[in-house]
């Protein structure tokens, strides 16, 4: 028996090794950072995000997220075209800390190569194992 | 946890934002045991201090805690430190962790031939900072020392939880508060920390950095080093004008004949967060300086920076740009502290509990 993860890792999402998640609904994917990433960054205070219409490539940087102390790149879980950014984060970036998978989502994109690209992403179980390997 | 000058230290306990605001609104405690603590004693200790520092330590009354600089012969800053003048024959120096060995070598070289002794007591003591408008209330229950009667930049000898301590009314946050040197490195020091937690929030390196940056206090190694002189670091106020014959004095005398080529200034951003090494430009995008420390200010809710701009420098309130990962972002030259000092910091008018 292994200990349960101290981090939320919801079912039904795809995960990257850079700690982003994607929730795919039809031809749209909503993207954010994981609970682990939010807790590790600590207080998130600033984001730089692409505007709608921008093309993003899988595992290429699409923006930055900043805590008081440091800057981190955001990597796209999937290739596609940005359709929306979460306007609520402009004044309340702390939503990412409070609710990384729901109100703290970051962008939505129209994915273009889901079938071949999802092989490069992790399932919740694989991501949980991945996090354990980081702690070890 | 991060490794800092050989010490494993946390960046935050709960949240940098919460810890920062706890210090601005109430009180916070910091484990600053990594800071170097060096006793200087002996018949020539006073003469030695006079030869070492640009600040007149000798004419200060006993019980003063003085911020000053260690300079080399070229007036480059070897370290910044607090000197506690205990009495004519005894001083206690609180230096930066990463500079301590270098400071000791410098002092042994400069003091050669004088009759004094340097004792590095860092490993025999711990050090805790209690900072914020409620610092007196947090610390007073643990000590018989009348804290309310202490002036800023003075110190005294007493006990905290029955353990021998030096208490100095100094800090690195811009707030009122104390730094206490505890003569215990075991369960006694832990007991002091735990007792302080009743009236103050534990704070880590992240909050220490954002607090000192809002207050405008430079960090040795980031905002100044041996290639920086006190005038460009905007620390000319530590120089006692009537003093001479200390290390770096001749060079300083000639430097003071003209304005420095660059000067340390504060910047408050309209947007974006400046970081160490980012370029500063004027409105015409011509490079005029560099950021040496940057962060997000929890009080202003904006990016803030400390850095060097070439002189004649932009004036307070002038617009400058910081190049944030290729994108020039507007900011303004600002005075330190960046917060309203009638609402925050040791000068504040009122304090609501």
Image (spheres, coloured by chain):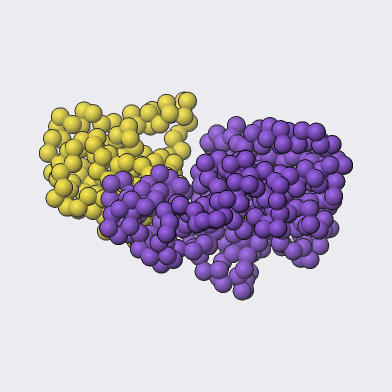
Chain colours: A yellow, B purple
Q: Is residue B208 left or right of residue A115?
A: right
Nearer to the camera, B241 or A33: B241
Q: Is residue B230 left or right of residue B65?
A: left
Q: Is residue B177 left or right of residue B343?
A: right
User: Residue at the spot x=28%, y=54% of the render?
Assistant: B285
Residue B234, quarter of the rendered image:
bottom right
Give how far across and how far down residue A91 sits, in percent. Answer: 34, 61
Q: Is residue B61 above or below residue B185?
A: below
Query: How many numbered dots are placed on residues in this image?
Result: 0
User: Residue at the spot x=42%, y=53% of the render?
Assistant: B310
User: Residue at the spot x=85%, y=46% of the render?
Assistant: B89
Give how far across and how far down residue B166 sits, in percent. Answer: 78, 49
Query: In this view of the protein, can residue B317 be seen by the observer?
Result: yes
Nearer to the camera, A102 or B93: B93
Q: Is residue B100 above or below residue B271?
A: above
Give how far across and how far down residue A14 sits, in percent. Answer: 26, 36
Query: In this view of the protein, can residue B203 be seen by the observer?
Result: no
User: Residue at the spot x=72%, y=36% of the render?
Assistant: B110
Give how far across and how far down residue A73 sits, in percent. Answer: 32, 41
């Amino acid at each position: 028996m292994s200990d349960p993860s101290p981090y939320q890792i919801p079912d039904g999402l795809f995960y990257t090794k850079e700690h982003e998640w994607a929730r795919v609904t039809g031809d749209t994917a909503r993207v954010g950072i994981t609970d682990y990433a939010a807790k590790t960054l600590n207080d998130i205070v600033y984001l730089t995000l692409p505007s709608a219409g921008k093309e993003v490539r899988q595992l290429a940087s699409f923006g930055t997220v900043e805590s008081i102390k440091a800057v981190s790149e955001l990597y796209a879980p999937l290739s596609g075209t940005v359709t929306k950014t979460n306007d609520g984060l402009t004044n309340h970036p702390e939503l990412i800390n409070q609710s990384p998978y729901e109100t703290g989502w970051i962008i939505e994109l129209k994915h273009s190569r889901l079938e071949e690209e999802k092989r490069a992403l992790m399932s919740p179980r694989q991501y949980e194992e991945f996090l354990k390997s980081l702690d070890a | 946890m991060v490794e800092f000058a050989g010490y494993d230290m946390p960046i935050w306990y709960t949240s940098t934002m919460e810890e920062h605001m706890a210090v601005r609104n109430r009180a916070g405690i910091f484990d600053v045991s990594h800071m170097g603590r060096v006793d200087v004693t002996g018949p020539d200790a006073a003469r030695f201090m006079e030869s070492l520092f640009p600040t007149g330590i000798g004419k200060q009354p006993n019980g003063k805690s003085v911020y000053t600089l260690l300079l080399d012969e070229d007036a480059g800053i070897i370290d910044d430190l607090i000197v506690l003048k205990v009495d004519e024959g005894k001083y206690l120096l609180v230096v930066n962790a990463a500079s301590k060995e270098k400071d000791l070598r410098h002092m042994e070289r400069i003091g050669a031939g004088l009759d004094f002794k340097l004792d590095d007591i860092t490993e025999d003591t711990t050090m805790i900072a209690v900072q914020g408008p409620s610092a007196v209330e947090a610390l007073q229950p643990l000590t018989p020392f009348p804290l309310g009667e202490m002036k800023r930049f003075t110190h005294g000898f007493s006990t905290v939880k029955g353990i021998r301590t030096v208490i100095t009314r100094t800090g690195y946050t811009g707030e009122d508060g104390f730094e206490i040197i505890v003569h215990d490195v075991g369960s006694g020091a832990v007991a002091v920390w735990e007792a302080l937690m009743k009236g103050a929030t534990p704070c880590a390196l992240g909050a220490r950095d954002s607090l000192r940056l809002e207050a405008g206090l430079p960090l040795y190694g980031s905002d100044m080093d041996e290639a920086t002189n006190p005038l460009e670091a905007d620390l000319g106020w530590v120089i006692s004008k009537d003093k001479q014959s200390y290390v770096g004095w001749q060079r300083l005398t000639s430097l003071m004949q003209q304005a420095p080529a660059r000067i340390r200034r504060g910047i408050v951003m309209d947007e974006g967060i400046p970081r160490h090494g980012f370029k500063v430009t004027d409105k015409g995008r011509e490079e005029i300086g560099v950021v040496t420390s940057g962060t997000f200010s929890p009080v202003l809710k904006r990016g803030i920076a400390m850095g060097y701009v070439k002189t004649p420098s932009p004036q307070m309130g002038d617009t400058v740009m910081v190049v944030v990962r290729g994108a020039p972002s507007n900011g303004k030259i600002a005075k330190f502290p960046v917060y309203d000092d009638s609402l925050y910091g040791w000068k504040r008018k009122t304090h609501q509990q």
